[in-house]
Image (cartoon, grey):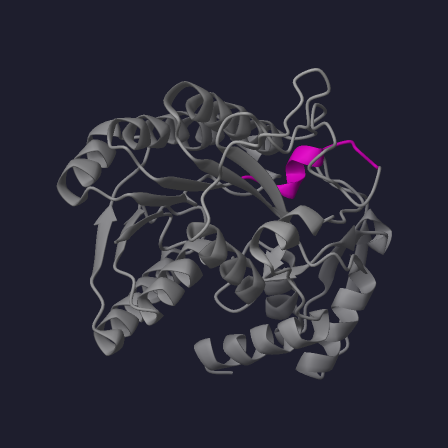
Amino acid sequence: MSVLVTGAAGFIGFHLAKKLLEIGTPVLGIDNLNPYYDPTLKKARLDQLDLTASSSQTDLQIIQGDIENNSVLREAFEVHKPKIVVNLAAQAGVRYSIENPNAYIQSNLVGFANVLECCRHHKVQNLIYASSSSVYGGNTNMPFSEKQGVDHPVSLYAATKKANELMAHTYSHLYGLPATGLRFFTVYGPWGRPDMALFLFTNAMLKGEPIKVFNEGNMIRDFTFIDDIIESVIRLIEKPAIPDKSFDPISPDPSSSWAPHRIFNIGNSKPTPLMEYINALEEALGIKAKKTYLPIQPGDVPATSSDTRALQEWIGFKPNTSVKEGVDRFVAWYRDFYDI
């Protein structure tokens, strides 16, 4: 049974599609190759997928188009009839949502509504969709648990991700659509996004330029390696959401439901100070970073930390790659990809 992966040329979408092909699962990918960051990297990812499909002799089809274009999405569902959908297409980035909110409305809300409608009408058996740790917003009660409220977002990006969770739950309730929302925590690794800290730091350090360290370096992140994210998603593909028979509507648990809908954190559960992350990069590159210390940016939060007990109980796995190993593997990829 083929899996539809939206955002297949994106960071997480690429890695998921590649893993699926490696284990012999046909992949239908959709991506608009937008210029939010260098499309050359996205095209290189697609080239890698072609090579993987060829070597594994597994079917791969890529459609270039926007999920907010309902006709493109409807045609994909009508022709290919996917029964498993992983929605990773979205306008990414917290800070860009402050500059260009309409891009988030179109992709993250209109686009996701189109995905839900197609899943509804084509009897999809399992929908997995990307949420974000950003939904925890102004909450400082850590580690963040799915049982906590997420009613105080500090960016439009976060607000659209919470909206996605509410929209998906409604479709689970009304139409019996099994749906699982994933709150990713600071994903990093090979083939990562150029707008994220590790990529920006590496590029600047190799050029001898200073890196921008926000909140004067007083940041803590639950850095989660991409391979751990993908292992979690693969296991969730094999285990769709089901109604929680113990759900109590008098004292409702935000992470569960009487409907076939679940929410899971996917994080490393080992929050790391930003300066330790930078130290790991300095060791991997053999370069001491020049640092420019700056105030915290609008829409950002000083710390994140994930409680992943629910995920581990559901799929028997939790992310566990150390920051040192993850950073080393990113640097090895970066040197190889850019021939440094």
For this rendering, which residue is in front, 145 or 189?
145
- Percent across and percent down for residue 133 are 65, 42
Q: Specify whether 219 is left or right of 119.
A: right
- Quarter residue 176 falls in: top left
- Residue 52 visible to the viewer: yes
Image-based side of 319 in relation to 269, left or right = left
Does residue 66 lie above or below 286 as drawn? above
Q: Is residue 137 magenta?
A: yes
**Residue 263 position within the rendered picture, expressed as x and y whole percent measured from the top left:** 58, 38
Q: Point out the residue furthest to the left here.
A: 79
Residue 24: x %, y % from top left:
29, 68
Give the magenta part as a residue range: 131-140
**At x 50% / y 39%, what residue is drawn?**
180
Horizontal side, residue 7 vs residue 243: left or right: left
Give coordinates of residue 202: x percent, y percent: 62, 69
150 lies above or below 265: above
Q: On the image, which quarter does residue 62 sit in?
A: bottom left
Can residue 290 be seen?
A: no
Residue depicted at x 67% and y 22%: 248
State the predominant SS element of the stretch in magenta: loop
Q: Quadrant of the N terminus?
A: bottom left
